[in-house]
Amino acid sequence: MVLSWTRRNVFRRAKKEKEQSQLLEVEVVIPNHFRCPVSLELMTDPVTLSTGITYDRVSIEKWIEGENRTCPVTNQVLTTFDLIPNHAIRMMIQDWCVQNSSYGIERIPTPRIPISSYEVSDTCTRILSACQRGRCQELVGKIKVWGRESERNKRCIVGAGAGAVLAYAFDCFSSNSIDKHVVVLEEVLEVMTWMIPFGEEGVSKLSSRASLNSLVWFLEGKDLASRQSAALLLKEVCVQELAKVGNVVEALVKMLREPIGSSTPTKACLATIFNLVSSAAANREGIVQRFVELGLVSLLLEAIVDGEKGVCEKALGVLDCICDCQKGKEVVESNALALPLVVKKLLRVSPLASSFAVSILRKICDKREEGVLVEALQVGVFQKLLVMLQVGCDESTKENATRLLKLLNGYRNKAECTDSSSLDFKHLKKPF
């Protein structure tokens, strides 16, 4: 009895699997009038041009953004670029999807109507007037929701100049008590991160003393999202004005010491630090010394060991600028990890990273420091520089490499060379 019941179940299961496999083998043919004439894919948001031809919104928008001024099918010159939603075709496609759901076809969702430039401009005008009354959180939230809906909405918002308006709003609320307007400032911060780069007007507003103080305040805060947003915006501001802000050095070092999940804010902070230490600001020397006192050199070396390509490039760039300062150069030279690590990164990351590495070596390898030269030879710098010249590099790097080779050549008999690629830094312990 049990045996026959088990056998029956096996037969049923086999029959069911056979039916399912037959269903999967059936090729579903999409009707031609449901396909976009450009992409030849099933339309998910059909829209009609002035010529009467229906396309998928994404495809025809890319066509128009490519500066095409004709209808792809009829080749007629478009008198208007208005895209009219074709609800009849869309509902027919949805019905067809439901009828063929047994073949694994999902029903396309009803698309949201994209925003227009007029709607964005009207909202921006209302934000400008609301800033005077100290109430614009709801309007900023509306722009935030629009941006989440689609990339097309984001492009429309940015094209309408919303970045400059939000920069003005950020400056306006920052001029008053930050604690009082922290919620709306956080909203503006989040929205502005996907509007980078800003126009000249937006950068000017973000570079005001009030805005910069507010950005540094958020960078030092505890809210991770706000810290990340502040880090992304700081690299866009005027560096001469940023150099005048108190606590900016401490805030940036703290961000490197206590990194947030992804590498994006770390790269943004390194870019801001590079702008500060490489700028022509009057207090540049003092800024570099302050960075060095806060232990930036050790943090940079840690980033070079563990960081991805972008992080490594920026960290080497900052280290190169620090070596221009006498105190920074001394700290780099005194760190036992610096020289072998910089040599290790030659030819292993990117041409830009190798260029920074050669520049650093040129600055710390002095003929008066025989020990440094011998150590550089021991970790294989001579062979790597020769390979770099053979492979090819820019003129500045070639000049630095040639000078280094001439300097090192006189000490080759005093050093037993080793391969720097065999050096292992995975057990490096953070100095903090």
Image: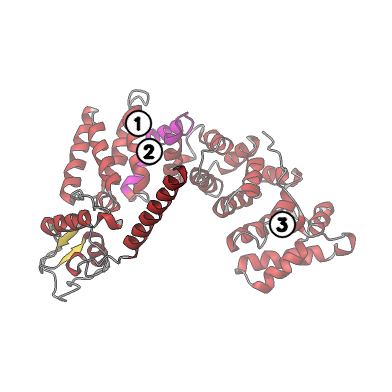
Mark 1: few, some, or many residues within 10 Å (few <14, many ≥20)? Answer: many
Residue 409 lies in what quarter of the image? bottom right
Cβ atoms at labels 3 and 2 below 8 Å apart: no
In the rendered image, residue 212 lying in the magenta stretch gets the answer: yes
Residue 408 lies in what quarter of the image? bottom right
The kind of residue tagged 1 is Ser
> On screen, 283 above or below 356?
above
Q: Which residues are magenta?
A: 201-226
- Where in the figure is residue 277, as x and y percent of width and height? 56, 46
- Where in the figure is residue 239, as x and y percent of width and height? 46, 45
The kind of residue tagged 2 is Ser
Residue 123 lies in what quarter of the image? top left
Please state which of the two labelled residues, at mark 3 or mark 1, is closer to the viewer. 3
How far separated are the C-alphas under marks 3 and 1? 46 Å
Task: Please state if 308 lies on the left or on the right of 162 as rendered.
Answer: right
Cβ atoms at labels 3 and 1 below 8 Å apart: no
Q: Which mark is residue 208?
A: 2
Q: Which mark is residue 120?
A: none
- Give SS at disc 2: loop
The residue under label 1 is 174
> If the image is split into quadrants, where does the N terminus sit?
top left
Please state which of the two labelled residues, at mark 1 or mark 2, is closer to the viewer. 1
Q: Residue furthest right?
A: 414
- Give SS at disc 3: helix
Task: Please state if 57 lies on the left or on the right of 210 as rendered.
Answer: left
The residue under label 3 is 343
Question: Which residue does the image show at 17% across and 55% down from the upper left?
Answer: 95
How far separated are the C-alphas under marks 1 and 2? 10 Å
- Give SS at disc 1: helix
The kind of residue tagged 3 is Val
Majority secondary structure in the magenta region: helix
